[in-house]
Image: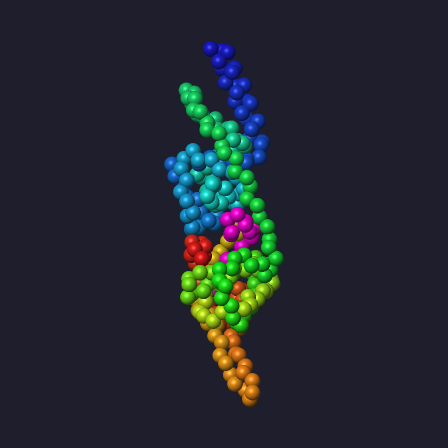
Amino acid sequence: MAKLVVTILIAISLCGTLVAQKPRFVTVITEEANLRGTPTSAGEILAVVEEGDRFRLIEKKGAWYLVQTPAYVGWLHGNTIRLETDSRGASVVVRPKAIQPLVYKPIEPLIYVPPVETRRPATGTVMASGSYRTGLGYLVISNGTETDAIAKLIDLSSSTSYRDVYIQANTATTIQNIAIGNYELLFSLGRDYAPSVNKFLTNASYSKFDSYITFDETKQVIGNTIRTNYDSYTLTLNTVVGGNAATSRISEAEFIKY
């Protein structure tokens, strides 16, 4: 009996050294946990994960932990997880109030998930071009915020994205050669753009301009010449004094469906 007690004390002492290691994974400890798009209890629920699921830890913000799952990158509350140093064991040693019988439970190996790569495209970079229709109209988009933006010009005639462009903070770009038609402008603001998921990983928000944008072209005869008149607009993603274009928040699902 004396030998058994010594063995347990040595095991506890060895496990205690793991506390100093930096956590790199988390394990879900509640029956179910909500994976949210932002580090707040009001954030959009991206998925529901289950007890025992393990994910790679990206960063911590207050009581929230950003993790990478096979399908999403999202936030879990600290009350729903246990921190892990590696794929083999936990980084936190819990001393039970009473001695409990040891039960062997095999641990399934974790599948390695590479870190999500982020980059910052130049202002004006076309992220997607969904139409071959062209015209004379153009749209200037000014991003006067402190975060980068992705703007989507939606062609309402086909309900598809006419052009997606990247706009860095405090810069502007122009979408040229826009065809005749009615359009809607959607935009996302945030930091740490990840090409693999085509979205911002940090502080992402999604909005749209409430009014449609109409581009038209008319012919005007002046003497022996014919002049073509066309529409052009300037929109700012930040609030400006005297501005007349209202915006509304939308969900990530509405933004990415185009």
Magenta range: 185-199
Q: Which residue does the image show at 50% across and 49% down from the upper left? A: 197
Residue 132 at x, y = what percent?
50, 63
Residue 164 at x, y = what percent?
52, 59
Who is closer to the viewer here, 8 or 75?
75
Q: What secondary structure is the magenta-colored segment mainly?
A: strand
Q: Is residue 187 magenta?
A: yes
Compared with 208, 107 (above or below) is: above
The mark tally for this picture is: 0
**Residue 194 appears anywhere in the view:** yes
Location of the C terminus by quadrant is: bottom left
Compared with 153, 54 (above or below) is: above
Residue 62 at x, y = what percent?
52, 45
Q: Is residue 38 magenta?
A: no
Compared with 178, 83 (above or below) is: above
Q: Which residue does the image show at 54% across and 50% down from the upper left? A: 195
